[in-house]
Image (cartoon, rainbow, N blue to C red):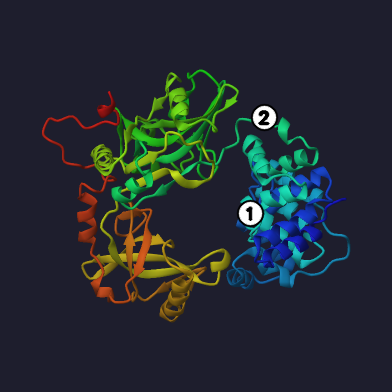
Amino acid sequence: MEGFLREFADVNDAVAISGSKLRKQKIFAEYLRNLADDDLRRAIWYAAGRAFAATDERVLGASGAIVSDVLILLLKIDAHEYYQRCLRAGEVGEAIAPIWPRREGAGLTLADLADAFEELARVGRPENKRQILSELFERCAAGREAAYLAKIIFGDMRTGMQGGVLQAAVAETFAKPQAAIRRAELMIGDLGEVAVRARRDELESIRFALFHPIQFMLATPQESPEIAEKTLAGRPFFAEDKLDGIRAQVHKSGDRIAIYTRTMDRTEDAFPDVVESLRPIAGEFVIDGELVPFRDGMVLPFAHIQRRLGRKLLSPQVLRENPAAFIAFDVLYLNGELLIDLPLRDRNDILKSIDGLIALPHEEVTDVAQIEAAFSASRHRRNEGVVLKDPESVYSPGRRGQAWLKLKTHLPTLDCVITAAEYGNGKRRNSLSDYTFAVWDEDHLVNIGKAYIGVTDQEIAQLTETLLPLSRGQYGRVHLVEPRIVLEVACDSIQRSDRHASGFALRFPRIKRIRWDKRPDDADTLARVREIFKSPENFAHGGHEMTENAPEPTLFDEFR
Protein backbone atom coordinates (compact mmCIF):
# COMPACT_ATOMS: atom_id res chain seq x y z
CA MET A 1 0.00 0.00 0.00
CA GLU A 2 1.04 3.64 -0.45
CA GLY A 3 2.59 5.17 2.66
CA PHE A 4 1.17 8.45 3.94
CA LEU A 5 2.95 10.79 6.32
CA ARG A 6 -0.19 10.98 8.47
CA GLU A 7 -0.11 7.23 9.12
CA PHE A 8 3.66 7.34 9.71
CA ALA A 9 3.07 10.09 12.30
CA ASP A 10 0.31 8.14 14.07
CA VAL A 11 2.46 5.01 14.27
CA ASN A 12 5.48 6.91 15.59
CA ASP A 13 3.35 8.71 18.17
CA ALA A 14 2.16 5.30 19.39
CA VAL A 15 5.77 4.10 19.48
CA ALA A 16 6.91 7.21 21.39
CA ILE A 17 4.40 6.82 24.23
CA SER A 18 5.13 3.12 24.67
CA GLY A 19 7.63 2.47 27.44
CA SER A 20 8.38 -1.08 26.30
CA LYS A 21 10.95 -1.76 23.59
CA LEU A 22 9.12 -4.97 22.68
CA ARG A 23 5.87 -3.05 22.29
CA LYS A 24 7.62 -0.37 20.19
CA GLN A 25 9.03 -2.93 17.78
CA LYS A 26 5.68 -4.75 17.53
CA ILE A 27 3.80 -1.54 16.68
CA PHE A 28 6.33 -0.57 14.03
CA ALA A 29 6.58 -4.09 12.61
CA GLU A 30 2.82 -4.17 12.02
CA TYR A 31 3.11 -0.87 10.15
CA LEU A 32 6.07 -1.94 7.98
CA ARG A 33 4.51 -5.23 6.93
CA ASN A 34 2.03 -3.70 4.48
CA LEU A 35 4.28 -1.10 2.83
CA ALA A 36 5.53 -1.46 -0.73
CA ASP A 37 9.30 -1.81 -1.12
CA ASP A 38 10.14 1.85 -1.81
CA ASP A 39 8.00 3.08 1.08
CA LEU A 40 9.41 0.35 3.29
CA ARG A 41 12.90 1.78 2.71
CA ARG A 42 11.69 5.34 3.29
CA ALA A 43 9.77 4.54 6.47
CA ILE A 44 12.88 2.98 7.99
CA TRP A 45 15.13 5.88 6.98
CA TYR A 46 12.66 8.43 8.34
CA ALA A 47 12.07 6.50 11.58
CA ALA A 48 15.84 6.66 12.15
CA GLY A 49 15.77 10.44 11.62
CA ARG A 50 17.39 10.26 8.17
CA ALA A 51 16.21 11.89 4.98
CA PHE A 52 18.24 9.38 2.96
CA ALA A 53 19.81 5.97 3.39
CA ALA A 54 22.68 5.77 5.88
CA THR A 55 25.01 5.06 2.94
CA ASP A 56 23.84 8.18 1.06
CA GLU A 57 26.12 11.13 1.78
CA ARG A 58 23.71 13.80 0.57
CA VAL A 59 22.50 16.39 3.08
CA LEU A 60 19.38 18.53 2.97
CA GLY A 61 21.19 21.75 3.85
CA ALA A 62 17.97 23.01 5.47
CA SER A 63 19.24 25.03 8.41
CA GLY A 64 17.17 25.88 11.46
CA ALA A 65 17.04 29.49 10.31
CA ILE A 66 15.66 28.58 6.88
CA VAL A 67 13.01 26.23 8.33
CA SER A 68 12.03 28.79 10.97
CA ASP A 69 11.64 31.53 8.35
CA VAL A 70 9.25 29.29 6.41
CA LEU A 71 7.20 28.25 9.44
CA ILE A 72 6.86 31.79 10.84
CA LEU A 73 5.43 32.95 7.50
CA LEU A 74 3.13 29.95 7.07
CA LEU A 75 1.79 30.14 10.62
CA LYS A 76 1.55 33.96 10.56
CA ILE A 77 3.09 33.95 14.02
CA ASP A 78 5.27 36.48 15.78
CA ALA A 79 8.92 35.41 15.70
CA HIS A 80 9.32 35.85 19.46
CA GLU A 81 6.27 33.67 20.15
CA TYR A 82 7.57 31.04 17.72
CA TYR A 83 10.95 30.84 19.44
CA GLN A 84 9.34 30.75 22.89
CA ARG A 85 7.16 27.84 21.77
CA CYS A 86 10.24 26.02 20.47
CA LEU A 87 12.02 26.67 23.75
CA ARG A 88 9.15 25.30 25.83
CA ALA A 89 8.62 22.28 23.60
CA GLY A 90 12.33 21.56 23.26
CA GLU A 91 12.05 21.07 19.47
CA VAL A 92 10.41 22.58 16.39
CA GLY A 93 8.05 19.71 15.55
CA GLU A 94 6.24 19.63 18.88
CA ALA A 95 6.17 23.44 18.98
CA ILE A 96 4.23 23.84 15.72
CA ALA A 97 1.88 20.85 15.97
CA PRO A 98 -0.71 22.41 18.36
CA ILE A 99 -1.11 25.57 16.26
CA TRP A 100 -1.00 23.97 12.82
CA PRO A 101 -4.07 24.88 10.71
CA ARG A 102 -6.02 21.86 9.45
CA ARG A 103 -6.25 21.58 5.68
CA GLU A 104 -8.40 19.53 3.36
CA GLY A 105 -6.86 16.67 1.46
CA ALA A 106 -5.02 13.42 2.00
CA GLY A 107 -1.78 15.12 2.98
CA LEU A 108 1.75 14.12 2.05
CA THR A 109 2.93 10.66 1.07
CA LEU A 110 6.34 9.25 1.94
CA ALA A 111 7.13 9.45 -1.77
CA ASP A 112 6.31 13.18 -1.72
CA LEU A 113 8.87 13.62 1.06
CA ALA A 114 11.47 11.65 -0.89
CA ASP A 115 11.00 13.84 -4.00
CA ALA A 116 11.24 17.05 -1.98
CA PHE A 117 14.28 15.85 -0.05
CA GLU A 118 16.11 15.02 -3.28
CA GLU A 119 15.34 18.52 -4.55
CA LEU A 120 16.47 20.12 -1.28
CA ALA A 121 19.77 18.27 -1.44
CA ARG A 122 20.23 19.31 -5.09
CA VAL A 123 19.65 23.08 -4.80
CA GLY A 124 22.08 25.34 -2.97
CA ARG A 125 20.51 28.80 -2.80
CA PRO A 126 18.62 29.52 0.45
CA GLU A 127 15.69 31.10 -1.38
CA ASN A 128 15.23 27.91 -3.43
CA LYS A 129 15.30 25.80 -0.29
CA ARG A 130 12.71 28.08 1.34
CA GLN A 131 10.41 27.67 -1.65
CA ILE A 132 10.65 23.87 -1.57
CA LEU A 133 10.08 23.75 2.19
CA SER A 134 7.17 26.18 2.02
CA GLU A 135 5.38 24.05 -0.60
CA LEU A 136 6.12 20.90 1.40
CA PHE A 137 4.81 22.19 4.74
CA GLU A 138 1.76 23.75 3.07
CA ARG A 139 0.69 20.24 2.03
CA CYS A 140 0.65 18.97 5.64
CA ALA A 141 -3.03 18.42 6.41
CA ALA A 142 -2.61 18.17 10.18
CA GLY A 143 -0.30 19.19 12.99
CA ARG A 144 1.17 15.74 13.53
CA GLU A 145 2.23 15.58 9.86
CA ALA A 146 3.98 18.94 10.19
CA ALA A 147 5.58 17.80 13.43
CA TYR A 148 7.09 14.67 11.87
CA LEU A 149 8.18 16.51 8.75
CA ALA A 150 10.18 18.84 11.00
CA LYS A 151 11.49 15.92 13.08
CA ILE A 152 12.80 14.15 9.97
CA ILE A 153 14.38 17.32 8.57
CA PHE A 154 16.24 17.93 11.84
CA GLY A 155 16.95 14.22 12.50
CA ASP A 156 15.31 14.55 15.92
CA MET A 157 12.66 11.83 16.24
CA ARG A 158 12.63 11.20 20.04
CA THR A 159 10.56 8.02 19.68
CA GLY A 160 13.05 5.46 20.98
CA MET A 161 12.80 3.68 17.64
CA GLN A 162 16.45 3.91 16.58
CA GLY A 163 19.32 1.42 16.53
CA GLY A 164 18.64 -2.05 17.86
CA VAL A 165 14.90 -1.45 18.35
CA LEU A 166 14.51 -0.60 14.67
CA GLN A 167 16.56 -3.67 13.71
CA ALA A 168 14.31 -5.79 15.93
CA ALA A 169 11.21 -4.35 14.27
CA VAL A 170 12.53 -5.31 10.84
CA ALA A 171 13.35 -8.79 12.11
CA GLU A 172 9.82 -9.20 13.53
CA THR A 173 8.20 -7.85 10.36
CA PHE A 174 9.68 -10.58 8.19
CA ALA A 175 10.20 -13.32 10.82
CA LYS A 176 14.00 -13.23 10.58
CA PRO A 177 16.56 -13.58 13.41
CA GLN A 178 17.66 -10.17 14.64
CA ALA A 179 21.28 -11.34 14.41
CA ALA A 180 20.78 -11.92 10.68
CA ILE A 181 19.31 -8.41 10.25
CA ARG A 182 22.17 -6.88 12.26
CA ARG A 183 24.74 -8.76 10.20
CA ALA A 184 23.12 -7.75 6.92
CA GLU A 185 23.09 -4.08 7.95
CA LEU A 186 26.77 -4.33 8.83
CA MET A 187 27.44 -5.73 5.35
CA ILE A 188 25.65 -3.06 3.29
CA GLY A 189 25.00 -0.23 5.74
CA ASP A 190 21.37 0.49 4.82
CA LEU A 191 18.67 -1.02 7.05
CA GLY A 192 15.99 0.02 4.57
CA GLU A 193 17.57 -2.12 1.86
CA VAL A 194 18.08 -4.92 4.38
CA ALA A 195 14.33 -4.90 5.06
CA VAL A 196 13.56 -5.28 1.36
CA ARG A 197 16.08 -8.13 1.07
CA ALA A 198 14.54 -9.78 4.15
CA ARG A 199 11.09 -9.65 2.53
CA ARG A 200 12.56 -11.33 -0.55
CA ASP A 201 14.48 -13.96 1.49
CA GLU A 202 17.75 -12.65 0.08
CA LEU A 203 19.72 -12.01 3.27
CA GLU A 204 22.10 -14.90 2.61
CA SER A 205 23.12 -13.41 -0.73
CA ILE A 206 24.25 -10.06 0.75
CA ARG A 207 27.95 -9.35 0.38
CA PHE A 208 30.02 -6.70 2.13
CA ALA A 209 30.14 -3.30 0.42
CA LEU A 210 32.82 -0.69 1.00
CA PHE A 211 32.29 2.99 1.75
CA HIS A 212 29.78 2.79 4.51
CA PRO A 213 31.17 2.98 8.06
CA ILE A 214 31.10 -0.09 10.29
CA GLN A 215 30.27 0.66 13.91
CA PHE A 216 33.44 0.71 15.98
CA MET A 217 34.25 -1.91 18.59
CA LEU A 218 34.63 -0.19 21.96
CA ALA A 219 36.70 -0.78 25.08
CA THR A 220 35.36 -1.03 28.62
CA PRO A 221 37.01 1.36 31.15
CA GLN A 222 39.00 -0.13 34.02
CA GLU A 223 39.69 2.01 37.08
CA SER A 224 43.03 0.46 38.03
CA PRO A 225 45.61 -2.14 36.95
CA GLU A 226 44.40 -4.37 39.81
CA ILE A 227 40.84 -4.37 38.48
CA ALA A 228 42.12 -4.97 34.95
CA GLU A 229 44.16 -7.96 36.17
CA LYS A 230 41.02 -9.54 37.62
CA THR A 231 39.27 -9.11 34.27
CA LEU A 232 42.18 -10.77 32.46
CA ALA A 233 41.89 -13.72 34.89
CA GLY A 234 45.36 -15.00 34.03
CA ARG A 235 44.89 -14.79 30.26
CA PRO A 236 47.50 -12.92 28.18
CA PHE A 237 46.15 -9.74 26.56
CA PHE A 238 47.73 -7.43 24.00
CA ALA A 239 48.64 -4.04 25.52
CA GLU A 240 48.61 -1.06 23.11
CA ASP A 241 49.19 2.62 23.76
CA LYS A 242 45.91 4.52 24.03
CA LEU A 243 46.46 7.39 21.64
CA ASP A 244 44.99 10.86 22.08
CA GLY A 245 43.48 11.46 18.67
CA ILE A 246 40.36 10.81 16.63
CA ARG A 247 39.19 7.21 16.26
CA ALA A 248 38.86 6.62 12.55
CA GLN A 249 38.08 3.98 9.96
CA VAL A 250 39.72 4.06 6.53
CA HIS A 251 37.98 2.58 3.48
CA LYS A 252 40.10 2.27 0.31
CA SER A 253 39.48 0.88 -3.15
CA GLY A 254 41.82 1.97 -5.92
CA ASP A 255 42.24 5.75 -5.69
CA ARG A 256 39.03 6.20 -3.73
CA ILE A 257 39.62 6.79 -0.01
CA ALA A 258 37.12 7.65 2.73
CA ILE A 259 37.86 8.28 6.40
CA TYR A 260 34.97 7.95 8.88
CA THR A 261 34.89 9.04 12.53
CA ARG A 262 33.02 7.41 15.42
CA THR A 263 30.05 9.65 14.62
CA MET A 264 30.02 8.05 11.13
CA ASP A 265 30.97 11.39 9.54
CA ARG A 266 33.47 11.79 6.71
CA THR A 267 36.64 13.63 7.73
CA GLU A 268 39.21 13.13 4.94
CA ASP A 269 38.91 16.80 3.89
CA ALA A 270 40.61 17.77 7.17
CA PHE A 271 43.45 15.30 6.52
CA PRO A 272 44.58 15.61 2.88
CA ASP A 273 48.15 14.69 3.85
CA VAL A 274 46.91 11.48 5.52
CA VAL A 275 44.88 10.60 2.42
CA GLU A 276 47.97 11.05 0.24
CA SER A 277 50.02 8.84 2.56
CA LEU A 278 47.41 6.07 2.21
CA ARG A 279 47.00 6.34 -1.55
CA PRO A 280 50.07 4.26 -2.55
CA ILE A 281 49.06 1.33 -0.32
CA ALA A 282 47.98 -1.61 -2.46
CA GLY A 283 44.69 -3.44 -2.02
CA GLU A 284 41.08 -2.88 -1.08
CA PHE A 285 40.58 -2.61 2.67
CA VAL A 286 38.86 -1.30 5.79
CA ILE A 287 41.29 -0.38 8.57
CA ASP A 288 40.45 0.70 12.13
CA GLY A 289 42.81 3.12 13.83
CA GLU A 290 43.46 6.62 15.14
CA LEU A 291 44.13 9.97 13.48
CA VAL A 292 46.81 11.64 15.57
CA PRO A 293 49.07 14.69 15.39
CA PHE A 294 52.37 13.01 14.56
CA ARG A 295 56.00 13.88 13.83
CA ASP A 296 59.17 11.76 13.87
CA GLY A 297 57.49 8.79 15.52
CA MET A 298 55.95 10.91 18.29
CA VAL A 299 52.29 11.64 18.98
CA LEU A 300 51.97 15.38 19.55
CA PRO A 301 49.40 17.19 21.77
CA PHE A 302 45.80 16.86 20.58
CA ALA A 303 45.54 20.63 20.06
CA HIS A 304 47.38 20.16 16.74
CA ILE A 305 44.45 18.09 15.45
CA GLN A 306 41.92 20.66 16.65
CA ARG A 307 43.61 23.36 14.56
CA ARG A 308 42.68 21.39 11.44
CA LEU A 309 39.01 20.82 12.24
CA GLY A 310 36.23 23.13 11.08
CA ARG A 311 38.41 24.99 8.56
CA LYS A 312 37.13 25.49 5.03
CA LEU A 313 40.69 25.87 3.76
CA LEU A 314 43.79 24.14 5.11
CA SER A 315 46.79 26.25 4.21
CA PRO A 316 50.24 24.72 3.66
CA GLN A 317 51.32 26.44 6.89
CA VAL A 318 48.52 24.81 8.93
CA LEU A 319 49.42 21.39 7.52
CA ARG A 320 53.12 21.96 8.10
CA GLU A 321 52.70 23.14 11.70
CA ASN A 322 50.10 20.48 12.56
CA PRO A 323 51.30 17.24 10.95
CA ALA A 324 49.04 14.20 11.22
CA ALA A 325 49.15 10.47 10.59
CA PHE A 326 46.82 7.48 10.66
CA ILE A 327 47.98 4.82 13.13
CA ALA A 328 46.39 1.44 12.31
CA PHE A 329 45.48 -1.13 14.95
CA ASP A 330 42.97 -3.45 13.26
CA VAL A 331 41.95 -4.67 9.81
CA LEU A 332 38.28 -5.48 9.19
CA TYR A 333 38.22 -6.21 5.47
CA LEU A 334 40.91 -6.98 2.90
CA ASN A 335 40.66 -7.73 -0.82
CA GLY A 336 37.16 -9.17 -0.82
CA GLU A 337 37.28 -10.93 2.54
CA LEU A 338 35.48 -9.69 5.67
CA LEU A 339 37.77 -10.42 8.62
CA ILE A 340 35.77 -9.41 11.69
CA ASP A 341 35.04 -13.01 12.69
CA LEU A 342 38.74 -13.91 12.82
CA PRO A 343 40.57 -13.73 16.18
CA LEU A 344 42.45 -10.49 16.81
CA ARG A 345 45.73 -12.44 16.77
CA ASP A 346 45.11 -13.42 13.12
CA ARG A 347 43.82 -9.98 12.16
CA ASN A 348 46.97 -8.49 13.66
CA ASP A 349 49.19 -10.73 11.50
CA ILE A 350 47.22 -9.69 8.41
CA LEU A 351 47.53 -6.01 9.38
CA LYS A 352 51.32 -6.34 9.62
CA SER A 353 51.40 -7.78 6.11
CA ILE A 354 49.99 -4.57 4.56
CA ASP A 355 52.99 -2.56 3.39
CA GLY A 356 52.86 1.19 3.91
CA LEU A 357 50.67 1.35 7.02
CA ILE A 358 51.89 2.70 10.35
CA ALA A 359 50.77 -0.12 12.62
CA LEU A 360 50.44 0.34 16.38
CA PRO A 361 52.84 -1.98 18.24
CA HIS A 362 51.72 -4.14 21.15
CA GLU A 363 53.12 -6.41 23.85
CA GLU A 364 51.52 -9.20 25.86
CA VAL A 365 50.61 -8.64 29.51
CA THR A 366 49.07 -10.91 32.14
CA ASP A 367 49.52 -9.44 35.62
CA VAL A 368 49.49 -6.13 37.48
CA ALA A 369 53.23 -5.54 37.16
CA GLN A 370 53.15 -5.98 33.38
CA ILE A 371 50.03 -3.81 33.03
CA GLU A 372 51.62 -1.05 35.13
CA ALA A 373 54.84 -1.25 33.11
CA ALA A 374 52.92 -0.96 29.82
CA PHE A 375 50.91 1.91 31.23
CA SER A 376 54.03 3.77 32.43
CA ALA A 377 55.76 3.27 29.08
CA SER A 378 52.73 4.65 27.26
CA ARG A 379 52.58 7.67 29.55
CA HIS A 380 56.33 8.21 29.05
CA ARG A 381 55.54 8.44 25.34
CA ARG A 382 52.94 11.09 26.27
CA ASN A 383 49.97 8.91 25.39
CA GLU A 384 46.74 8.53 27.40
CA GLY A 385 47.24 5.07 28.82
CA VAL A 386 46.74 1.54 27.52
CA VAL A 387 44.12 -0.53 25.75
CA LEU A 388 44.16 -4.23 26.65
CA LYS A 389 42.80 -6.59 24.00
CA ASP A 390 42.02 -10.30 24.11
CA PRO A 391 44.04 -11.80 21.22
CA GLU A 392 41.29 -14.38 20.68
CA SER A 393 38.50 -11.79 20.37
CA VAL A 394 36.46 -11.24 17.22
CA TYR A 395 35.59 -7.69 16.16
CA SER A 396 32.17 -6.84 17.66
CA PRO A 397 30.84 -3.63 16.06
CA GLY A 398 29.23 -1.17 18.47
CA ARG A 399 29.83 -3.33 21.51
CA ARG A 400 31.61 -2.82 24.81
CA GLY A 401 32.55 -6.03 26.58
CA GLN A 402 35.39 -7.68 28.39
CA ALA A 403 37.39 -8.36 25.19
CA TRP A 404 38.80 -4.82 25.01
CA LEU A 405 39.65 -2.82 28.14
CA LYS A 406 41.04 0.68 28.55
CA LEU A 407 43.03 2.17 31.40
CA LYS A 408 43.62 5.92 31.48
CA THR A 409 45.17 8.35 33.93
CA HIS A 410 42.87 10.88 35.58
CA LEU A 411 44.17 14.29 36.53
CA PRO A 412 43.30 15.77 39.91
CA THR A 413 39.70 17.00 39.98
CA LEU A 414 38.79 20.69 40.07
CA ASP A 415 36.12 22.36 42.18
CA CYS A 416 34.30 24.78 39.86
CA VAL A 417 31.37 27.19 40.18
CA ILE A 418 28.32 26.99 37.86
CA THR A 419 27.93 30.28 35.96
CA ALA A 420 25.35 29.21 33.34
CA ALA A 421 22.90 26.36 32.80
CA GLU A 422 21.25 25.26 29.57
CA TYR A 423 18.14 23.21 28.88
CA GLY A 424 18.96 19.74 27.56
CA ASN A 425 17.42 17.65 24.81
CA GLY A 426 15.05 14.70 24.68
CA LYS A 427 13.74 13.79 28.10
CA ARG A 428 15.88 16.61 29.56
CA ARG A 429 14.44 19.33 27.35
CA ASN A 430 12.61 20.94 30.29
CA SER A 431 15.52 20.59 32.71
CA LEU A 432 18.71 22.58 33.15
CA SER A 433 21.14 19.76 32.48
CA ASP A 434 24.17 21.34 30.73
CA TYR A 435 26.38 23.38 33.05
CA THR A 436 29.06 25.97 32.27
CA PHE A 437 31.53 26.32 35.14
CA ALA A 438 34.37 28.60 36.21
CA VAL A 439 37.36 28.99 38.52
CA TRP A 440 38.66 32.04 40.36
CA ASP A 441 41.16 34.43 38.76
CA GLU A 442 41.98 36.60 41.77
CA ASP A 443 38.61 38.22 42.61
CA HIS A 444 36.53 37.20 39.58
CA LEU A 445 35.36 33.99 37.92
CA VAL A 446 36.57 32.83 34.49
CA ASN A 447 34.83 30.04 32.61
CA ILE A 448 36.85 26.93 31.92
CA GLY A 449 34.38 24.36 30.57
CA LYS A 450 30.94 22.88 30.16
CA ALA A 451 29.67 19.41 31.12
CA TYR A 452 26.47 17.39 31.34
CA ILE A 453 27.84 13.88 31.99
CA GLY A 454 27.95 12.45 35.50
CA VAL A 455 24.73 13.67 37.13
CA THR A 456 21.63 11.58 37.68
CA ASP A 457 18.09 12.56 36.66
CA GLN A 458 17.31 13.19 40.32
CA GLU A 459 20.33 15.49 40.67
CA ILE A 460 19.38 17.33 37.46
CA ALA A 461 15.89 17.94 38.85
CA GLN A 462 17.42 19.22 42.09
CA LEU A 463 19.85 21.49 40.23
CA THR A 464 17.07 22.84 37.99
CA GLU A 465 14.96 23.70 41.01
CA THR A 466 17.96 25.37 42.67
CA LEU A 467 19.32 27.25 39.65
CA LEU A 468 16.13 28.75 38.18
CA PRO A 469 15.64 31.17 41.11
CA LEU A 470 19.32 32.14 40.70
CA SER A 471 18.85 33.16 37.04
CA ARG A 472 20.27 36.56 36.10
CA GLY A 473 18.71 36.41 32.67
CA GLN A 474 17.68 33.96 29.97
CA TYR A 475 19.23 33.96 26.49
CA GLY A 476 17.53 31.37 24.30
CA ARG A 477 17.95 28.05 26.08
CA VAL A 478 20.59 29.34 28.49
CA HIS A 479 20.19 30.88 31.95
CA LEU A 480 23.07 32.90 33.34
CA VAL A 481 23.03 32.17 37.06
CA GLU A 482 24.42 33.57 40.26
CA PRO A 483 27.60 31.68 41.18
CA ARG A 484 26.36 29.63 44.13
CA ILE A 485 26.71 25.92 43.21
CA VAL A 486 30.05 24.10 43.21
CA LEU A 487 30.77 21.03 41.06
CA GLU A 488 33.70 18.65 41.37
CA VAL A 489 34.83 18.14 37.77
CA ALA A 490 37.13 15.44 36.37
CA CYS A 491 38.80 15.52 32.95
CA ASP A 492 41.32 13.64 30.86
CA SER A 493 43.58 16.59 30.15
CA ILE A 494 43.83 20.38 30.18
CA GLN A 495 44.78 22.32 27.08
CA ARG A 496 45.11 25.94 26.07
CA SER A 497 42.04 27.37 24.38
CA ASP A 498 40.62 30.72 23.32
CA ARG A 499 37.09 29.35 23.79
CA HIS A 500 36.94 30.32 27.46
CA ALA A 501 38.02 33.44 29.36
CA SER A 502 40.37 31.32 31.46
CA GLY A 503 42.51 30.56 28.40
CA PHE A 504 42.14 26.83 29.07
CA ALA A 505 39.71 24.05 28.25
CA LEU A 506 39.11 20.65 29.83
CA ARG A 507 39.16 17.61 27.55
CA PHE A 508 36.27 15.20 28.20
CA PRO A 509 35.02 16.98 31.33
CA ARG A 510 32.55 15.11 33.53
CA ILE A 511 30.85 15.94 36.80
CA LYS A 512 32.12 13.74 39.60
CA ARG A 513 29.75 15.11 42.22
CA ILE A 514 27.86 18.19 43.34
CA ARG A 515 29.66 19.81 46.24
CA TRP A 516 26.69 20.99 48.28
CA ASP A 517 29.12 21.18 51.19
CA LYS A 518 31.27 23.88 49.55
CA ARG A 519 30.82 27.61 49.11
CA PRO A 520 31.69 29.38 45.83
CA ASP A 521 34.71 30.89 47.56
CA ASP A 522 36.05 27.35 48.06
CA ALA A 523 36.35 26.73 44.31
CA ASP A 524 39.75 26.26 42.69
CA THR A 525 41.83 29.03 41.16
CA LEU A 526 43.27 29.65 37.73
CA ALA A 527 46.70 29.24 39.31
CA ARG A 528 45.74 25.67 40.26
CA VAL A 529 44.61 25.03 36.67
CA ARG A 530 47.97 26.27 35.37
CA GLU A 531 49.75 24.03 37.88
CA ILE A 532 47.89 20.92 36.68
CA PHE A 533 48.34 21.99 33.05
CA LYS A 534 52.13 22.10 33.48
CA SER A 535 52.31 18.83 35.43
CA PRO A 536 53.87 15.72 33.83
CA GLU A 537 50.51 13.93 34.19
CA ASN A 538 48.89 16.35 31.71
CA PHE A 539 49.95 14.91 28.36
CA ALA A 540 48.12 17.65 26.43
CA HIS A 541 50.54 20.52 26.99
CA GLY A 542 53.54 18.80 25.41
CA GLY A 543 56.05 20.48 27.73
CA HIS A 544 57.44 17.48 29.59
CA GLU A 545 60.84 17.78 31.12
CA MET A 546 63.39 15.56 29.40
CA THR A 547 66.90 14.59 30.47
CA GLU A 548 69.39 16.97 28.91
CA ASN A 549 70.35 15.89 25.36
CA ALA A 550 68.18 12.76 25.69
CA PRO A 551 66.02 12.02 22.63
CA GLU A 552 62.28 12.25 23.04
CA PRO A 553 60.60 8.82 23.33
CA THR A 554 58.73 7.73 20.23
CA LEU A 555 55.82 5.37 19.77
CA PHE A 556 58.08 2.60 18.50
CA ASP A 557 61.22 2.77 20.67
CA GLU A 558 60.45 -0.22 22.88
CA PHE A 559 59.21 -2.43 20.05
CA ARG A 560 62.24 -2.33 17.75
Which quadrant of the figure has residue 138? bottom right
> Residue flagged by tag 2: what amino acid is it?
Arg
Residue 242 coordinates in the image, percent (x, y): 35, 40
Which label is found at residue 207? Answer: 2
- Spatial separation of the CA atoms under disc 2 and disc 1: 29 Å
Q: Nearer the viewer, residue 224 or 254?
A: 224
Q: Residue beneath label 1, please? A: 155
For the residue labelled by badge 1, is the local secondary structure a helix, a strand or a loop?
A: loop
Q: Residues within 10 Å of mark 1 (few under 14, many from 20)?
A: some
Residue 261 horizontal/vertical position (percent): 50, 41
Which percent across, then down, holds residue 107?
A: 84, 59
Residue drawn 68% across the image and 64% down it: 16
Residue 89, given in percent of the width and then of the height, sits at 62, 70
The amino acid beneath tag 1 is Gly
Q: Measuring 61% from the left and 68% from the top, which residue is drawn there?
A: 86
> Can you say whether 107 is above or below 553 in the image?
below
The front one of 112 and 290 is 290
